[in-house]
Amino acid sequence: QVQLVESGGGLVQPGGSLRISCVASGFTLEYYSIGWFRQAPGKEREGVCTYDTRDGRTHYSDSVKGRFTISRDNAKNTVYLLMNNLKPEDTAVYSCAAMPGRLVDRFPDWGDYEYWGQGTQVTVSL
């Protein structure tokens, strides 16, 4: 069964850090480019960062640049998102998505991907 499953979300204080995971099953993540998205209540889904499997390049939105880092462990078929210096405005459901081969754009739309996860809640609050 092909699926992406996120985990690692939770409640963290402002300024804290959190690492969330996205585990793939049913396909080999190494051959796919990855996108992390987030959606806060009442807001549209936004692309946070991407990883191009063709050359390993990463791209970050201005809102998270310098604070978030995407990485991949091929042996574990897992992608991670390390989030540092978290802010209340980072509160959202975070989801991963995968598309075969190279990215079609620096920040492809959600619908451009082939597989999607259900998301994990990240809450930044005192």
Image: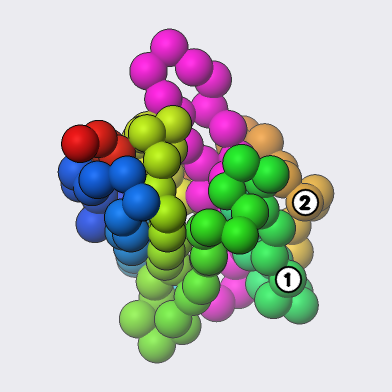
Residue 80 showing in the rendered view: yes
Q: Is residue 57 left or right of residue 18?
A: right
Identify the coloring.
rainbow
Q: Is residue 8 left or right of residue 26?
A: left
Answer whether residue 37 is magenta in the image: yes
Q: Amino acid at mark 2?
A: Arg
| Quarter of the view holding residue 44 | top right
Q: Earlier in the sequence, mark 1 or mark 2?
A: 1
Q: Secondary structure at mark 1?
A: loop
Q: Is residue 29 left or right of residue 3?
A: right
Residue 79's spot in the image, x, y percent?
Answer: 44, 68
Q: Amino acid at mark 1?
A: Arg
Residue 41's spot in the image, x, y percent?
Answer: 37, 18
Residue corresponding to mark 1: 57
Residue at image coords 20%, 36%: 126
Image mark for residue 43: none
| Quarter of the view holding residue 125 | top left
Q: Is residue 113 left or right of residue 77?
A: right
Image mark for residue 106: 2
Please state the extent of the stretch shown in magenta in the rendering.
30-48
Residue 94's spot in the image, x, y percent?
Answer: 39, 42
Residue at image coords 43%, 12%: 42
